[in-house]
Amino acid sequence: QPALTQPPSASGTPGQRVTISCSGSETNIGTNYVYWYQQLPGTAPKLLIYRDNLRPSGVPDRFSGSKSGTSASLAISGLRSEDEGDYYCATLDDYLNGPLFGGGAKLTVL
Amino acid sequence: EGQLVESGGGLVQPGGSLRLSCVASGFSFSSFCLSWVRQAPGKGLEWVAHIKQGGGEKYYVDSVKGRFTISRDNAKNSLYLQMDSLRAEDTAVYHCVREVSSATPWFDPWGQGTLVTVSS
């Protein structure tokens, strides 16, 4: 069964740069765009990055996305306490009839 | 920008049924595909169902096929999810989402969600 693998947790101190990875395969990340969502505590998910590396209006440029082969990454620079929450990657898979989400990474700002 | 507001969640016994609704505002509802995405308590996100603009194309995650039915009423700017033969594992917050690009995980905006609890 296709899957996207994310580290369960990530952490950093204020001002630091952290990255969250999303590992897949040729049938998903390797051939489809990657999307990233931010879910702050008690709120609905919010689109953070679309089509691998594009930011919707209103998303600070501290957030950036990249992709190489069958892996993608979300980078957050100038870490702030309000960035604490869960981060999910998502993409399509050639063998599924709908989107696939990663398991999510919980970001803690120390 | 757009807004989505879900309703209809609640407590239901295993084997029971529930119908979720989602009302949209602030965008041309009939021009977009829509999906339902759920999140079990303390767990990650899972796509559940997709419906095309006119309602003629529908897709489901395997675990709900034959039990859930997605539908829409473009005249009422409304999306629905009829859930039958509910199981404990269907317990989750159900979010209504707009697909910015058809049949992709480009979801924006998200509704706040409605909680479905399946328990005896």
Image (cartoon, coloured by chain):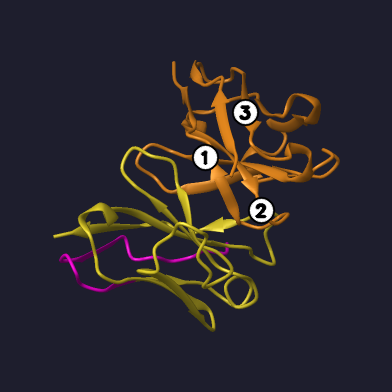
Chain colours: A yellow, B orange
Indicate the amino acid at tag 2.
Answer: Val
**Counting residues from the N terminus, which is met first, the one under dot 3 or under dot 1?**
3
**Counting residues from the N terminus, which is met first, the one under dot 1 or under dot 2?**
1
State the image coordinates of residue B37 (x, y, percent, origin top left): 56, 42
Which residue is labeled 2 in the image? B100
- Residue B85 location, quadrant: top right
Q: Are marks 2 and 3 on the same chain?
A: yes
Indicate the chain on which mark 1 is placed.
B
Measure the alpha-carbon separation of dots 1 and 2. 18 Å
Which residue is labeled 1 in the image? B38
Give the left or right position of residue A90, taking residue B104 as reference: left
Secondary structure, mark 2, is: loop
Q: Residues within 10 Å of mark 1 (few under 14, many from 20)?
A: many
Q: Is residue A6 magenta?
A: yes
Secondary structure, mark 3, is: strand
Indicate the chain on which mark 2 is placed.
B
Label placed on residue B22: 3
The C terminus of chain A lies in quadrant: bottom left
Measure the alpha-carbon separation of dots 3 and 1. 14 Å
Q: Which residues are magenta?
A: A1-19
A58 and B39: which is toward the camera: A58
State the image coordinates of residue A99 (x, y, percent, origin top left): 61, 56
B63 and B36: which is toward the camera: B36
